[in-house]
Amino acid sequence: MKTFEMKTVIHFGENALDRLRTIPYKRALVITDPIVVQSGMIELITAPLDKAGITYDIFQDVVPDAPVGKIAEGVKKFLEFQPEVVVAVGGGSAIDSSKAIREFALKINDYGKVGLIAVPTTSGTGSEVTSFAVVNDTHAKVKYPLVSDSLTADEAILDAELVRSVPPAVTADTGMDVFTHALESYVSTEHNEFSSALAEKSIEICGVFLLRAYLDGNDMHARQKMHVASCLAGLSFNTAGLGITHSMAHQLGAMFHIPHGRANAMLLPHIVEFNANINKHSRSQKEYLPAVKRYANIAHILGLSNYNKVMTVRSLVNWIQFMQKEMNIPLTIQELGTIPPDAYFGALDKMADAALADTCTANNPRVPTKEDIIKIYTKLWAF
Ligand SMILES: NC(=O)c1ccc[n+]([C@@H]2O[C@H](COP(=O)([O-])OP(=O)(O)OC[C@H]3O[C@@H](n4cnc5c(N)ncnc54)[C@H](O)[C@@H]3O)[C@@H](O)[C@H]2O)c1
Ligand SMILES: [Fe+2]
């Protein structure tokens, strides 16, 4: 038996933030990124809360990649303030931190149900509708997803006005995260009709609107579309899971602080080749792995011409690399220019072990060995 559940109520479109005026709570803890406060964007959140007469406090110390130390600080604040609802405002880092803070605080003092309203300010993770919270154990240098239905937000508010200020590099990284979610969930071993429909629509939107949003951050039509695409991809992978692009990207984030979406974008072409078992030297075969047909569907949605199976997978790989080049995302680790070769190659063994142990690996369409993972990390250095 399979189950498809959408637990989160989604408010979207123009003036979606008005929902904050009518939420059924009197005491809110807003958990957010310092940028949201410094830029004044926070007023878009506090104004409706003020209008509704809701008492609130703000924890604004979220840092990228949800380190456990910051989560512990947030838990302290939560327990002191005892909110009825958490309003998580920010990118995936702020939303994941909020999920973890609420979860752990209530394990210490379960004083009753506390709601969670997620308000994304990036179009990327889909965290506003997923039961995942990716946390970063900075001591062990491992990033891993916590997965539990209890982490899922009750409501999500998708207001593209909050993404207007996202700089082009972050639009590129987070947009490729959306695409990776949709593609990985589409070929996952757990894919089903519901997750596939959501992924297909998300990919169609990325194909048309991601470059537009990157080239002009004030193109609010493109921003709104990508905000919805992010959520659709989140709903898709929430039921179908992801794959080794994410397992491997988590380690690049934990070890070398490569932004999450950027790490995904860089790995993705290599993972498509691995999952399809087709690379630029491949010739036509009699039989192909199951992922090949799924990748061909995606190539079709993106409007890429398909001559045969090998060409189709190649066209998808080329499209991903075209997007990287258009949006100034490096193709290789060497091109990043920030990681010494000794540090990178010295970390491969540990990263490969952690990637294999990551929960996302279980749903990858082709089972990787440790050698496969090391080979892909090695190729990523310079190919
Ligand atoms: N929970 C999930 O389902 C899930 C899925 C994928 C990734 N993740 C995790 O989410 C995190 C990444 O989240 P992200 O990609 O949204 O990045 P992020 O939250 O780390 O934000 C990236 C940068 O953009 C800035 N920023 C955010 N909103 C902005 C705005 N409106 N204007 C200007 N700057 C803004 C932030 O301050 C930060 O510097 C990673 O830890 C990743 O592992 C979670
Ligand atoms: Fe992701």
Image (spheres, helix red, strand yellow):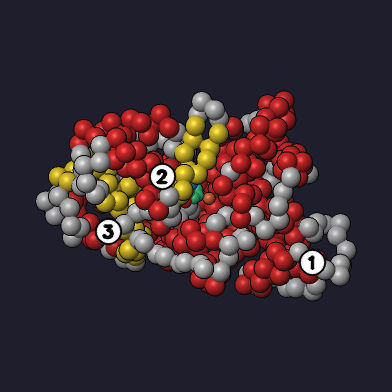
Query: Do the numbered discs 2 and 3 sit on residues whose CB atoms are within 8 Å?
Result: no
- CA separation, marks 2 and 1? 38 Å
Q: Relative to 75, is 86 above or below? A: below
Answer yes or no: disc 3 within 8 Å of ligand 1: no
- The residue at which mark 1 appears reads as 288
Q: Callout 1: 10 Å neighbours few (<14), some, many (20+)?
A: some
Q: Where does residue 104 sit, x and y in percent of width and height?
A: 34, 38
Residue at left offset 73%, top offset 73%: 305
Quick one: 88 or 121, which is closer to the camera?
A: 88
- The residue at which mark 2 appears reads as 96
Residue at left offset 38%, top offset 49%: 151
Q: Where does residue 17 sit, x and y in percent of width and height?
A: 27, 58
Q: Which quadrant is the C terminus positioned in?
A: top right
What kind of residue is marked 3? Leu
Secondary structure category for the residue under label 3: helix
Quick one: 73 or 281, which is closer to the camera?
A: 73
Asked whether, in this view, residue 5 is left or right of residue 105, the answer is right
Label whose residue precedes the other's in the sequence (2 or 3):
3
Secondary structure category for the residue under label 1: loop
Figure quarter occupied by ligand 1: top left
- The residue at which mark 3 appears reads as 17
Q: What is the quadrant of residue 274 in the picture?
A: bottom right
Q: Any mark on residue 21, and which?
A: none
